[in-house]
Image (cartoon, rainbow, N blue to C red):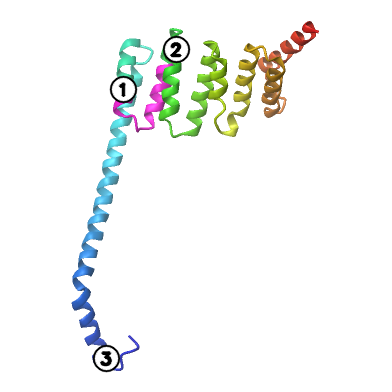
């Protein structure tokens, strides 16, 4: 406003600006306020939906271990209806656990693959991936198991991943690769007392000495 020499000129300039732009300013304020309200409504609706989904998930989980058929049906229905929810992957893990109690390993693999696909949480992906690889080893699908573990997963799961890789290599008769994998898993743990893992290494050493 410094370009205007008198207060009267400043007033006239303000009037002119308002006349030309007043409607747009008011419209912008109205839209902005409406957007603010809309955002709050959206957040409230989102929260309400999350609560509903959480309650539905809890209801499904309550039938786990009680009625296997009812749980499988309700859990599958829940996943279909809430496939974009974080609860979908958790439900798939629960279905995998239920199938494992019946030693239905192919079905376990299907549920674990579903958990991996639907999860946005890297920790859950890692847990499901390691479990899937172990199931694939159970099914003698060793190449598939190694492929499952070949994706990038959180570093905190490295020991479990290396140990599972070692199991797959061992089943394939690749003793040296198995030893390297087991040793890598043990190194991650800082040579802590992992009796089962150390036993696997000892068994490999005995096999090597027998082979010689």
Residue furthest bottom as drawn: 5
Q: Quadrant of residue 201?
A: top right
Q: Which mark is residue 59?
A: 1
Above or below, comparing residue 13 to residue 73 in the picture:
below
**Label 3 crowding class (10 Å Cα cut-off): few <14, some 14-19, many 20+?**
few
Q: Residues within 10 Å of mark 2 (few under 14, many from 20)?
A: some
- Residue 119 position within the rendered picture, expressed as x and y whole percent measured from the top left: 43, 31
Q: CA distance from mark 2 to mark 3?
A: 85 Å
Determine whether the residue tagged by mark 1 lies in a helix, strand or loop. helix
Residue 160, given in percent of the width and then of the height, sits at 60, 24
- Judge left or right: residue 69 versus residue 202: left
Q: CA distance from mark 3 to mark 1?
A: 71 Å
Residue at (42%, 12%) from the top-left corner? Answer: 99
- Residue 146, numbered label: none
Q: Eyeballing the image, is 211 above or below 109?
A: above
Q: Earlier in the sequence, mark 3 or mark 1?
A: 3
Query: Can residue 17 be seen by looking at this rendering?
Result: yes
Count of numbered marks: 3
Which residues are the magenta region?
79-96
Considering only vertical position in the picture, is 209 above or below 188?
Answer: above
Query: What is the spatial separation of the Cα atoms under label 2 and label 1, in whole angstroms?
Result: 26 Å
Find out whether the residues at labels 3 and 1 contact each other: C-beta distance under 8 Å. no
In the rendering, which numbered label is found on residue 7? 3
Image quarter where the N terminus lies is: bottom left
Q: Which residue is mark 2?
A: 106
Q: Residue 94 location, x and y as percent?
A: 41, 19
Q: Residue at x 35, y 33 (%)?
A: 84
């Amino acid at each position: 406003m410094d370009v205007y020499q008198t207060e009267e000129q400043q007033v006239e300039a303000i009037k002119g600006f308002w006349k030309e732009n007043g409607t747009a300013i008011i419209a912008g304020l109205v839209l902005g306020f409406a957007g603010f309200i809309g955002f709050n409504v959206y957040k409230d609706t989102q929260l309400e939906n999350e609560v509903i989904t959480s309650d539905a998930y809890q209801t499904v989980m309550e039938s786990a271990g009680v009625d296997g058929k009812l749980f499988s049906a309700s859990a599958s229905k829940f996943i279909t209806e809430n496939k974009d929810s974080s609860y979908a992957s958790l439900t798939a893990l629960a279905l995998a656990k239920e199938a494992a109690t019946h030693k239905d390993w192919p079905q376990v693999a299907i549920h674990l693959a579903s958990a991996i696909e639907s999860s946005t949480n890297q920790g859950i992906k890692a847990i499901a991936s390691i479990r899937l690889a172990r199931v694939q080893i159970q099914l003698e699908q060793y190449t598939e198991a190694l492929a499952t573990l070949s994706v990038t997963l959180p570093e905190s799961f490295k020991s479990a991943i290396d140990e599972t890789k070692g199991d797959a290599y061992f089943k394939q008769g690749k003793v040296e690769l198995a030893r390297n994998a087991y040793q890598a898993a043990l190194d991650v743990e800082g040579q802590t007392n992992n009796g089962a893992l150390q036993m696997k290494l000892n068994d490999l050493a005995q096999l090597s000495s027998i082979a010689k």
